[in-house]
Image: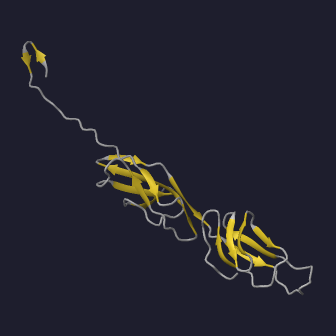
Amino acid sequence: SQASDECESERAEIEVVVKAKPEATIASTADSYCGESSAVKLSLSSDVDLTSATYSWKKDAAETATTSAVTNAEAGEYTCVVTLDGCSYMTEAKTITQNESPAYTISGDGSYCPESESKTPVVITFTAGKAPFTFTENVTGANTSTENTFTIINPSGGVYKLTSLTDDNGCEMTATAA
């Protein structure tokens, strides 16, 4: 109100509403995935109710989704602009990584007499994936290699192949006869 020479104007009031800032962080079911198919899901975690918010997800700065979550998120850097009641917030970036599925080659075959001192070693070369590798080979059993090659010196008779292979990223190969 205002007063002047004993005259006073009517009192007025206004209401100021401070809207909630839609701060959020990107949550993911995993930070990486193996091979070609991603099952990673990105969603938002917030202390604010985002039920009526709108979303603008970007992957590597390109628009990728306008939903509250991203499923099967492929490798890249993700951000999301959340808008609620006219207020917007951009999340910190979240990076999803694609890891190669481990793979291998195997070499070193031959025929030997039992008393032979000169045998060709069996060499397993890991051609994809991240060391150390944990694997099962059908003649020698379970093994671990911290290098990209594993050598079986003085091999005994049999057909050498891996029946399982897992790398340091937790990625697994499909059992194959290489």
Q: Position of residue 174 (x, y in %)?
A: 61, 77
Residue found at x 28% / y 38%: 18
Q: Position of residue 51 (x, y in %)?
A: 30, 55
The quarter of the picture where the N terminus appears is top left
Left or right: 17 with respect to 33? left
Left or right: 78 with respect to 85? right
Residue found at x 86% / y 79%: 120
> Residue 159: which quarter of the image?
bottom right
The quarter of the picture where the C terminus appears is bottom right
Is 67 above or below relative to 6? below
User: How many circles with numbers are drawn on the protein?
Assistant: 0
Residue found at x 39% / y 56%: 56
Near-viewer residue (86 or 172): 172
Near-viewer residue (134 or 96): 134
Is 127 above or below relative to 156? above
Residue found at x 44% / y 53%: 26
Furthest residue to the front?
Answer: 115
Furthest residue to the left?
Answer: 7
> Residue 116: which quarter of the image?
bottom right
Near-viewer residue (88 or 2): 88
Q: Position of residue 53 (x, y in %)?
A: 32, 53
Left or right: 124 with respect to 34? right
Is 10 above or below relative to 85? above
Q: Position of residue 44 (x, y in %)?
A: 40, 54
Furthest residue to the top?
Answer: 5
